[in-house]
Each structure stands twice: as C-alpha cells, then as structure tokens.
Amino acid sequence: MKCSVRKDKLAGAVGQVMKAVSLKTTIPILTGIKITADPEKLTLTGSNSDISIKSFILTDEKDEENAVIETAGSIILPSQIFSELVRKLPEDTVHLSVDSRLITTITSGSTEFTLNGLDPDEYPVLPSIEEKDVFSIRKDLLKDVIRQTVYAVSDSETRPVLTGVKWTLQNHRLECVATDSHRLSQRTIPIDSGNQAEKKTLVVPGASLNELAKILDDGDDSSADVVMTENQVLFKFSNVEFYSRLLDGNYPDTSRLIPTESKTTLTLATKELYKAIERASLLAKGERNNVVKLRTEDGTVEISSQSLELGRVFETLNPEKMEGEPLRISFSAKFMMDALGKIDSENVEIHFIGPMRPIIIRPIGEDDILMLILPIRTF
C-alpha cells in the first residue's frame, strides 16, 4: 500500500474511528485502526465488537484532491500512537507506505516514522447489512434525540436491556424511550420511513448512542440514513458508517408508568428552577440520595435542602402558573437537574399526582418530549 493524504482529512477520520477503539479489549487486533486504500478512497475502520466505525476519505471531493492512491492495500496500525502522531505531523500532507513485512513508513516534511503493522486479514469482518428497513433523520435532530433520552438509561448490568434506548418506528413516527426504573425520558418525532408501515422495535445501547452523538455536528441539518436489522443498526452520513449491535430482551412497557391525571401543576422558568435546585444540591450532595424538597404555599414554590453537618438552604420561586392542591414532595436533585438540563424551552410544566407518585416534566411548546422522575419518601 502506498498513498498520500491531506493531514486534516486523515486526522478527522482517525478521530472518528478512535471512538470505537478500546485499548482494554481482549482481542489485541482491535486495539488498532485498519486502513484500506483503493483507487477511489481511503477507508479507516475502528471496532470494539459492540460498535464499529468506518470513515471514508474520498480521493476527490467537491473538486478538491484529498488523497492520491499509488498502490492499493490494507494495514492495521496501533491506534494510540498513530492518532497522536497524525495530529503532530508538521506538514499538510502525510505519506503512507507499507512494505511486505507490514512495516509502515509515515512521512510528513522532514519527519519520518516507522510503525510495525498487523496483518489486515486477521481483522474481524464487519457485518453485512441488508438495507431493507431504512429511514432518514436530520443529523441535528438525531443528536438532540440522543441528548434528551440517553441520560436516563441504566448504568447497571443487572437488567442489560435498560442500558439501552428503545426505538419504536411506526406510522412515520419514531418514539425513543429510556428508563433506569427511577426516571424516564421519552421523545417522539416524525421521520421519513419511506413505505415502511410495519411496527419496528429495537433497543440501541446507550454507550453506542453517546459515541454516535460525538461525531454528529451541531447545527447540521443534512440527513443520516438509519438501517435496521434484527441484531444490528447502521447509521450512514457524511462519509461515515457507524455500526452498533442491538440489545436483546424484552423492554418494559413504559406507557403504564406515565400517569394521565394531575393534582398539582406548576409552570416555572426552566433555568430559574434548574439554578435553584443546583444551589440547594450544594448541601444535599453529601446526604443520602442527594434529596431536595419542593413545597407549594400561598402562590409560591419553596425549594429547600438540609445537611445534618452543614446546615439548611431555602429559596422561594414565583411560578408563571400554579394550579391544584398544595404540595410537599422530595426528589433527587441530580435526576431533576439531568432532566431540566436537556430542555431547550424557556418554561417547563411539572405535573404532580401525590407525594409518592411519579413527577411528570414537560417543556412548554414541545409536546413531543416527556420526562419522569420518581419522588423520594422523606416527609
């Protein structure tokens, strides 16, 4: 293999595939990055068995020459040292040359590295996915959906299926739900699913979605294609292919957790409420469950917390709107802040059913988002 490639393109591709590389894997060859050159493109691949990422550098793109392929071929290079040296090479062009002993010479200007490569034939073959069930989604919207749901997945392997986000596709709508049994987040969006009418359900690992979000650009309204199979999902966009395994198991019916009634409803400024809970949590951090209390009285909302060692804090908020019965309730400051921190709306509507019933959080003007947290018994 022999080729030349623009340093910025190579560094960008390396950065993308590195998100799928684990240095702790029990399969040594997966600690490397696979580089394949053919006449039309340079392909970089990283994998950790759970996710695999391919990043393509086209030789010519938009009338710009990104790479010159002199001799086709493949090599696997140690990911950590290769990613660091690519960033630190002095010139704008990087030359790669692989000999018959798999020794790779990397030159840029007057700098020359040689790295011992590994046999590319030993690299696991990525799954072949039949592009049958496909839908399209704007990349910025996909990133928002991930941000507003994945925080609620479980970090415990006791119930592995809860470490993922359940995606349900039906009637040109995608419903994404995450729960760890103590909180829940749900986002529903319209999508372009072609002629797909049959209900399709998949559970995507939260860890995979977190890595996917890192390579989705903010404000990019171009589309990504999502290809679904029985045990894999593939995201295709901007010269990138992102593969993830799916989780097995029956995801719980979360619709039964969402109350349909409300005894007390508060409308509050989202940032004001977040900051008040954040301040109250300064004393609550050292206490069990990081508990903050909320009480409604005489048209105001009181946020408070206390620590046996440190003291107490009280703060009064004036809600935009208050309806229903007086209320005293306790909840995890972290869980409430996690939810409020994902809301873009200026105001939020919070529904209470009782001191030990689920709390429902809905952004004003965004009916497709619902968040839920369970209260904590303290009174």
Image (spheres, grey):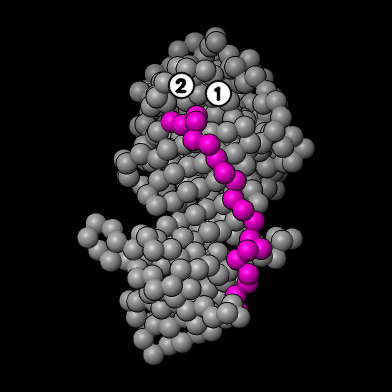
Q: Amino acid at mark 1?
A: Lys
Q: Residue at x 25, y 63 (%)?
A: 64
The magenta-colored residue range is: 116-135
Quadrant occupied by the C terminus: top right
* Label 1 crowd bin: few (<14), some (14–19), many (20+), radius 10 Å: some
- The residue that appears at 49% across and 35% down in the rendered structure is 131
Q: Does 246 sit left or right of 343 as displayed?
A: right
Place of residue 188 in the rendered image (x, y in percent of width and height, measured from the top left): 46, 24
Q: Amino acid at mark 2?
A: Gln
- Identify the residue at image location x=59%, y=30%: 202
Badge number at residue 200: 1
- Which of the pair 19/227 is nearer the observer? 227
Q: Are marks 2 and 1 in contact (CB under 8 Å)?
A: yes
Is 15 rendered above or below residue 93? above
- Is residue 266 one of those drawn in magenta? no
Mark toward the viewer: 2 or 1? 2
Percent across and percent down for residue 263 are 54, 11
Q: Which residue is mark 2?
A: 196
Residue 359 appears in the figure: yes
Decide: is 278 above or below 365. below
